[in-house]
Image (cartoon, rainbow, N blue to C red):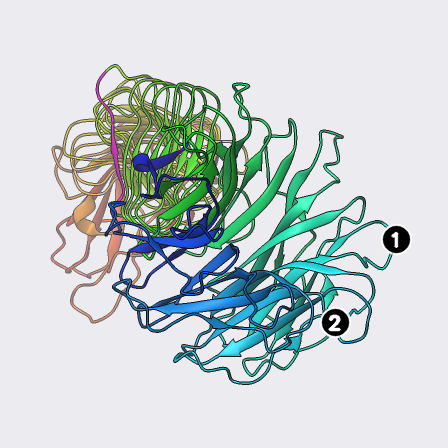
Amino acid sequence: MPIGRIGQEIIVNSTATGSQGDSSITALADGRFVATWRSLDGGDGDGSCIRARLYNGDGSAAGDDFIVNSTVANDQNLPSITALADGRFVATWESYDTIDDQGSCIRARIYNADGSPAGDDFIVNSTPEGYQFSPSITALADGRFAVTWESFDSGDGSGNCIRARIYNADGSATGDDFVVNSTPDEGQFDPSITALADGRFVVTWTSFDPGDGSGSCVRGRVHNADGSAAGNDFVVNSTAAGNQLDTSITALADGRFVATWQSADTGDGSGNCIRARIYNANGSASGGDFIVNSTAADNQFYPSITALADGRFVATWTSGDSGDGSGSCIRARLYNVDGSAAGDDFIVNSTATNEQSGSSVTALADGRFVVTWTSFEAGDGSGTCIRSQIFDPTVFIGTVGEDTWQGGNFADRIYGGASADTLSGLGGDDLINGDAGNDILNGSAGNDKLFGGEGNDTLDGGTGNDTMAGGGGNDIYIVSAVGDQTIEAAGQGTDTVRSYINWTLAANVERLELKGAGNLNGTGNALANTLVGNSGNNLLSGGAGNDYMVGGAGNDIFIVGAVGDSTIENVGGGTDTVRSYINWTLANNVERLELQGSSNLNGTGNSLNNTLVGNSGANSLNGGDGNDYIVGGAGNDTLTGGAGNDRLIGGTGSDILNGGTGNDTFDFDLASDSPAGPALRDSIVGGFSHGSDLIDLATIDANTLLAGNQAFSFIGSAAFSGVAGQLRYTNYNGTVIIDADVNGDSTADMQILVAGTNFMTGTDFIL
């Protein structure tokens, strides 16, 4: 049973004598509901009567059934009932006591909310000639009500017509009855009526003039609140083949309406089907008609339809396929606001013995709905009875098969079964449990709770702050709100989060994939994680464990802290950075390395033009191939440019700078970067190539006695003369010491050792 049953199926009638049939049901404003039906026990031996019974919202009876009609002569048949906004209700029916012997008439009676009559019944039709049949009633938005019926008196001799009459809330008629149909040819039969939210109403009926000679069709007409027509009638069905008949109609909360009917064209030759079509409030169709029943075997007939409080609608009908060979059953199917089915149809009745036929359905204010029907299993041998079942569409219970279900705008509880189910919420704070199987769970709006159960599940919380637990299997979580939570236990498969926001993996989740194009951050946990960036500028931090991090098209940052970590970038995937707390060699297509913390770490570049930045420890930085930019930072660092035209910046500390091959630049930003003294100064080693290598001192203020940044004056190997800004060298058997005086005291304030040469020239410097 897909939709949750509320309580047990009940027998509505307390009167057991004779047969009971042709039920109609409506919900009351206070949460109760009332059912009415035709009973062969009129209590006076004069024929059938109309009975009714009030029920509380929990399905318990508010009392015994009672006879609705005060007119007892002859038969009373085919009731229809509606609830008024003030808590009262009105029943109408076909009566064979017309007073003037004209055949049959339409009668009605108003009841107070407590079930007491507000007066005697009265004749609805003002047209007395001929027979009046098959009434349908609806409450209007302003407290009035309207009744429609089939009349033998069309006024033009063309055959049956559809008539209607509007009544005030006190039961007085606003005027005479009027003909609804504008198409007069052939016969018009079996109307259904519903009120729209703006005060208008719509009538649909079976017409034997389809306009194309194909058989009967379903026609409809929209009327204004005063009863005037808002336009001519129109053919409801877009499927023309075969007969279309036995219509039922309901209004949706957004002003649209839905008509349903029995169609001889199933498209598969299986027998009659149930079709429906959604119309906009102005009477224009919002699409073609569609087959309601998913069960195609045998015939489907006698539909009933109602709109639910959350904007969805449910249709019920009699089906010749009960699935167990016991006879006909009652089936139902729930539809979403957009007209898509929330799931397959299901059997309403739990009583399987004998025939079940002729359903009526109404929606309760709390989102539930109630179905009544005629059952040939009365349980006491008396004949037929009226049975009823309450359903809660916010509860879905899956089958052993593969279920597809969408909830509504209430707080739904949706439970899958053993197979691969697709279960979705909508609005409201939903609880969705996939159970076994590889399930797809979607919370949509609201703060939802999703439980995958066993199997490889996909859990998408949607909007709202959602809690998702995958359970066993390799699960996928889709997150998009900062309040989302994912829950996994140890050993429950290899799980993935696909995130549209900054995300940190919870415990026991192995993989993170950033989605969309935003600049997002992704953080791992203590496991060996896989982190995958999107097309934005991502920051990926693996955390503890040996992590595998894949950047995307943006300028990505990788944070690494384990020797087993790895970073992956494609060619052209932005300008990417590794921030490392351990010794690190840049992988292919990663441009920048920044060592973190204060440990003595090593950093190595790749074949690209890399930037390598040390930390406060004693670093060994090797650029490798490419034109590299290497910054030692604090600490006694060793910088190696390798191949290419490299720039080496030692920073503070006693650094060793090796440009390698190529045209290299040794950059000193401050005099304090290489103070005087063997233990303090920087050393340029590996062979200084005059004419290609350069020492850049341009950012150093050569004369601290003057404001601004003064350039050095190179004086060769001459001694200082007490002039600030002088730069000189001394040759020590193939090693040069460069001295700089920035305050004019003839003492070196800065020294640089250059190995492998015995001279320097002014062209070796950027001053």
Tag 2: amino acid: Ser
> At 25% across and 51% down in the image, what residue appears?
56
Q: Which mark is residue 213?
A: 1
Q: Quadrant of residue 533?
A: top left
Three-letter code for the amino acid on which mark 1 is drawn:
Gly
Q: How far apart in space, not on screen, are marks 2 and 1 (Cα)?
A: 22 Å
Residue at left offset 53%, top offset 22%:
323
Q: Is residue 658 visible?
A: yes
Residue 248, image x, y percentages? 58, 54
- Residue 282 vertical placement versus 54 (above, below): below
The residue drawn where x is 28% and y is 17% is: 492
Residue at image location 17% in from the left, 64% down from the top: 704
Q: Is residue 555 found inside the magenta-colored segment of the image?
A: no
Q: Which image quarter holds the N terminus?
A: top left
- Please, is residue 481 above or below residue 654 in the view? below
Question: Residue 677, image x and y in percent?
Answer: 12, 38
Can the viewer see residue 276 in this picture? no
Q: Residues within 10 Å of mark 2 (few under 14, many from 20)?
A: many
